[in-house]
Amino acid sequence: MIAGLTLGSEFDRTRWHVWTKRLLVALIGISILGCTGGVDSKLHRQVEDVLARKAKPLPRPAPPQTYVVYTYQGDGRDPFEPFYKPATKDIVREDDTSPFRPVEGRIKEELEEFPLDSLRMVGTLEQEADVWGILINQEGIVYRVQIGNYLGENFGKIIAILEDRVELEERARDSQGKWHLREASLALAE
């Protein structure tokens, strides 16, 4: 029996371990407190030395610049009107009979706001019969596209996704207002 504890039963062993842990924590705490005395006194001396130093006077700031008041003399002209008016483009005749005219009322897809040269193809994904092209824009955002999606500023519609490129058809209007179909592609980035 040690200090009222016997090591005979499981209950007594558990109490022995609890008291041993408490004693160990107390010894570690006392040893830590004993170690801080030297560091504390050195720190206090260093703080007192720094506080005892005389502060250097700051140089005088430069005098502020004088504020010059300007009065607007615009001869009755509005200062917020542009100096010139941009030239209006000639109104292009609409070609209602063209089979290549873009679909009206279609909601534009997200990739139609990017020029084609700002997009790069970085790979493809395949799952059974479905194939997707993986594109990335200049900001590093990744997009997944498939046949039938639109991209680019010229109503480009994806017609094929191959391992090394995405092929699309773009619709563009010439100076006479006629719509034409042209092919374009995005090659796989190296």
Image (cartoon, rainbow, N blue to C red):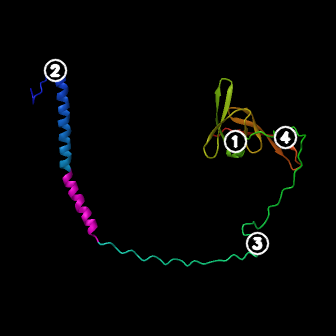
Residue type at numbered disc 3: Arg
Find residue 118 and report its horizontal and vertical position in percent: 68, 46
Q: How far, Cα to Cα, is label 2 from label 4? A: 94 Å
Q: Which residues are magenta?
A: 36-53
Residue drawn at point x = 85 percent, y = 39 percent: 100
The question of residue 40 being in magenta is answered with yes
The disc at residue 45 is none
Tell me if mark 2 has few (under 14), some (14-19) or many (20+) residues whose alpha carbon lies within 10 angstroms of its own.
few
Determine which residue is flagged by label 1: 111
Determine which residue is flagged by label 2: 9
Residue drawn at point x = 18 percent, y = 40 percent: 26
Tell me if mark 1 has few (under 14), some (14-19) or many (20+) residues whose alpha carbon lies within 10 angstroms of its own.
some
Q: Is residue 126 above or below residue 72?
A: above
The question of residue 182 being in magenta is answered with no
Q: How far, Cα to Cα, is label 4 from label 3? A: 44 Å
Answer yes or no: do the residues labelled 4 and 3 have beta carbons within 8 Å? no
* Predominant SS along the magenta part: helix
Residue type at numbered disc 1: Leu
The disc at residue 77 is 3
N-terminal label among 4 and 3 = 3
Residue drawn at point x = 17 percent, y = 40 percent: 27
